[in-house]
Amino acid sequence: MDFHSHSFLTDGTTSPTEMWNEAEALDHRALALTDHLALEDPRPLLTRLFQEAAAWDGTSFIPLVGVELTKVPPRRIAETARACRRAGAQIVIVHGETIVEHVPRGTNHAALESGEVDVLAHPGLLDAKDADLAKANGVALEISGRRGHSLCNGLVTRLALEAGADLVVDSDAHSVHDLIPIEQARRIALGAGVREPDLERVLYATPARLVRRLTKGA
């Protein structure tokens, strides 16, 4: 399962249908298409994604439709996430404070306290208080498989494990070639500092629980 990917509807290179086809071929149970969004109307993007997701109706594969709120002013994150929910987004993730881009300071904290965000992507130099907030509000913290964004995986993993916060391994794929098979996700998790006894929870139990929540048990 992978909760962070992009299509050619924003900065990816591949159609949503191709992304979901490849994820299914890699034996993922679910892949979230979370194309970038800021303060614009989310409905055109979500409508297009749902149109393509309909191809999997009646199958066991789950094509999750959502957004990645990207460089939204922190004071606007909660209201923007709520607007995406009202427009039908199944998953809302936030582009965290990666150290390889200029992301507004305070983005991590605003996302974690909003009550509207499912995953904080590549949080960068996460602090312990925000790891505790992720635990309190049920927000999963991302171990990123993407070059650059992955530079702080070790810190994020350590603080999440100390706080008891959820962790997920995501690809942040922008093409079918970026999608991560489960064995590669396992290696990324181990490299980030996830201990062997915690692997099952990070790679399977937490993602399965998140999918159930996002699909309301469907």
Image (cartoon, grey):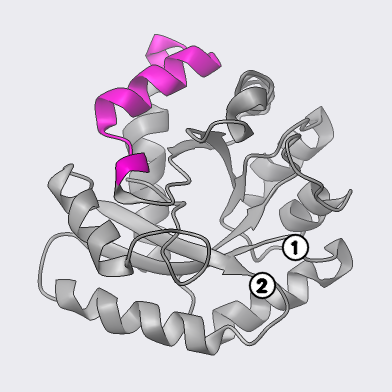
Q: Residue at x 47, y 33 (%)?
A: 145
Q: Which mark is residue 84?
A: none
Q: Is tag 2's residue or tag 1's residue first in the polypeptide sequence?
A: 2
Give the crowd class for mark 1: few <14, some 14-19, many >=20 residues within 10 Å.
some
Tell me if residue 179 is in the magenta stretch: yes
Vertical placement of residue 102 versus 160, above or below: below
Tell me if residue 104 is in the magenta stretch: no
Q: Which residue is mark 2?
A: 81
Q: Residue at x 59, y 79 (%)?
A: 84
Q: Which residue is mark 1?
A: 114
| Residue 118 visible in rendering | yes
Hey, what amino acid is under mark 2?
Ala
Q: Which quarter shows the N terminus?
A: top left
Give me the C-alpha separation between circle 2 and circle 1: 8 Å
Q: Residue furthest front?
A: 13
- Toward the viewer: 107 or 208? 107
Determine the secondary structure under disc 2: helix
Secondary structure mostly seen in the magenta stretch = helix
- Image position, residue 166 (x, y; %): 54, 37
Q: Residue at x 80, y 28 (%)?
A: 128
- Image position, residue 88 (x, y; %): 48, 83
- Image position, residue 91 (x, y; %): 49, 65
Determine the secondary structure under disc 1: loop
Segment colored magenta:
177-198
- Toward the viewer: 217 or 141? 141
Hey, what amino acid is under mark 1?
Ser
